[in-house]
């Protein structure tokens, strides 16, 4: 056994030995059987004791020892050894430095990262409650992966190019185990669009263009960030190349939700205001006062159904025919959850939802339009839940109605948040009174005009023009 070495010295000696191995799949196993690897394990134990870095250790035969899989695979050290065995010129000094940082740095808190089907300006960083909406540069990504020294030598560099500048919603999730691969289907809890609705909803209320979650990653900065390009939807972009020939380049599919740099300050302000309103409502979820508790749960239910409809709508012309009728149901459930009252009788729900939705809009034309949209939605919903097929519409008409219903539902959501009282008053009562009393209608109109004057979304509604 060698003399006591520092962690960096032990790693450099081990990597030097790798250069003499044949490039076979068994080379990494041979390396682990050499005394040099025992020097590395001893150096890890001295520099990063288990009391300070339990994530680096595993129990073997009743004893806690440095976990070989963590030290080799998760750190990237094993990949560095494989490259060296294949004769690839590897910056061994940087690899050793990266490995020392991996072992001795503080254990990272796992995070959930949601890749959005959208484009935002470089440098975007918007707080959304516990979440942060952020676009990352290549340099910032290089500080997140466990072995930056290998970025330019591995396929990973292409992976990072694919998501450089892409918008991610990220949030700490301390109790989540760190997985090896990004995943969309997570059977340990609700689907991502439902689980993270409080961060997604303000963005959706800002712009009427569709916003979806493309992929979900579990990230432990400096530990694991295994991007699989198959989990990032791409499209082919055609450029005019040399000599007039066209070049095709695979790029990330950014969808239609695009925020220009000039709009970023307004978006940040809007998100702050809306997140505050959502938090105020959701604070009642554990309140003993029944109306506050019910209001919070109804908001969450409405948001989940809205997001379920969004996630299954690639674009307004890209709705699966077999799901189009079901999307009507999601939107109607969202409207009911927001606008229903505990005092409502079951047989009058549809009429109440129509009248209350219309009361959220200003002017008879917009109110009649809201009534017509909700009435058509209820007709489609009724056909669907009774097992019938909506035969009175073509597929094109159905998709057009879905878009109209989606835009109405977004406006109802936004206006509901603006008008919902912070006390135990019932918003439905105010909306019912507004239908009968112009005084209440003026009260609603003034509150909405004040909000849109100070916190306008990107798409200003037709019934509330700019002053």
Image (cartoon, rainbow, N blue to C red):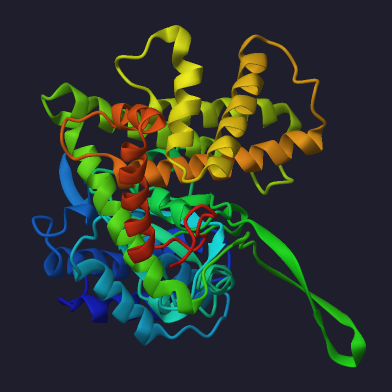
Looking at the image, can residue 318 be seen? yes
- Quadrant where the C terminus sits is bottom left
Count the marks.
0
Q: Quadrant of residue 444?
A: top left
Q: Is residue 200 left or right of residue 308?
A: left
In this orientation, which residue lies closer to the viewer: 100 or 335?
Answer: 335
Query: The N terminus is located in which quarter?
Result: bottom left
Pick the front one: 60 or 313: 313
Nearest the viewer among 399 and 12 is: 399
Q: Position of residue 228 (x, y in %)?
A: 55, 57
Residue drawn at point x = 37 percent, y = 48 percent:
445
| As drawn, 90 above or below 331 | below
Q: From this viewpoint, which residue is outermost toward the right?
A: 244
User: Residue at the bottom extreme?
Assistant: 243
Residue at 68% across, 31% down = 324
Residue 134 in the image: above or below residue 117? below
Kindly indicate the quadrant of the structure image that contains residue 430: top left
Q: Position of residue 290 (x, y in %)?
A: 17, 22
Residue furthest left in the image: 51
Q: Is residue 177 left or right of residue 207?
A: left
Residue at the image position 47 percent from the left and 52 percent from the top: 204
Q: Is residue 153 above or below residue 457?
A: below
From this viewpoint, which residue is outermost toward the front? 438
- Which percent across, then down, holds residue 337? 40, 27
Q: Is residue 392 left or right of residue 297?
A: right
- Residue 188 visible within the image: no
């Amino acid at each position: 056994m060698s003399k006591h070495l520092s962690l960096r010295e032990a790693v450099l000696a081990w990597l030097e030995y790798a250069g003499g191995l044949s490039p076979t799949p068994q080379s990494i196993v041979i390396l682990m059987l050499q005394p040099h690897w025992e020097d590395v394990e001893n150096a890890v134990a001295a520099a990063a004791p288990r009391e300070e870095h339990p994530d680096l250790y595993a129990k073997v035969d009743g004893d806690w020892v440095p976990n070989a899989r963590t030290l080799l695979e998760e750190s990237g050290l094993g990949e560095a050894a494989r490259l060296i065995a294949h004769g690839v010129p590897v910056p061994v000094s940087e690899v050793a430095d990266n490995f020392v940082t991996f072992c001795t740095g503080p254990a990272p808190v796992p995070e959930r990262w949601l890749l959005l089907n959208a484009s935002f300006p470089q440098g975007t960083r918007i707080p959304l409650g516990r979440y942060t909406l952020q676009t990352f540069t290549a340099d910032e990504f290089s500080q997140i992966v466990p072995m930056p020294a290998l970025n330019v030598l591995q396929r990973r560099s292409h992976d990072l190019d694919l998501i450089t500048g892409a918008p991610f919603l990220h949030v700490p999730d301390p109790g989540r185990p760190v997985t090896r691969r990004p995943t969309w289907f997570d059977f340990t809890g609700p689907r991502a669009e439902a689980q993270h609705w409080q961060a997604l909803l303000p963005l959706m209320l800002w712009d009427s263009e569709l916003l979806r979650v493309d992929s979900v990653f579990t990230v432990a900065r400096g530990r694991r960030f295994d991007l699989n390009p198959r989990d990032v939807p791409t499209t082919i972009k055609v450029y005019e190349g040399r000599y007039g020939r066209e070049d095709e380049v695979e790029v990330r599919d950014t969808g239609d939700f695009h925020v220009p740099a000039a709009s970023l300050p307004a978006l940040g302000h809007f998100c702050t205001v809306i997140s505050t309103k959502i938090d105020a409502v959701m604070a009642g979820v554990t309140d003993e006062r029944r109306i506050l508790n019910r209001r919070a749960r109804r908001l969450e239910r409405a948001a989940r159904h809205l997001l379920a409809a969004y996630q299954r709508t690639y674009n307004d012309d890209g709705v699966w025919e077999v799901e189009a009728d079901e999307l009507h149901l999601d939107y109607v459930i969202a409207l009911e959850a927001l606008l229903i009252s505990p005092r409502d009788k079951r047989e009058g729900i549809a009429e109440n939802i129509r009248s209350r939705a219309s009361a959220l809009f200003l002017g008879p034309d917009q109110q009649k339009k809201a009534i017509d949209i909700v009435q058509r939605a209820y007709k489609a919903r009724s056909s669907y839940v009774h097992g019938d097929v909506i035969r009175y519409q073509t597929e094109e008409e159905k998709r057009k109605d879905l878009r109209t219903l989606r835009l109405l539902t977004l406006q109802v959501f936004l206006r509901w948040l603006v008008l919902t009282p912070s006390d135990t008053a019932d918003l439905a009562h105010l909306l019912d009174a507004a239908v009968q009393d112009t005084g209440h209608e003026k009260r609603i109109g003034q509150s909405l005009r004040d909000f849109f004057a100070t916190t306008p979304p990107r798409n200003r509604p037709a019934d509330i023009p700019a002053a």
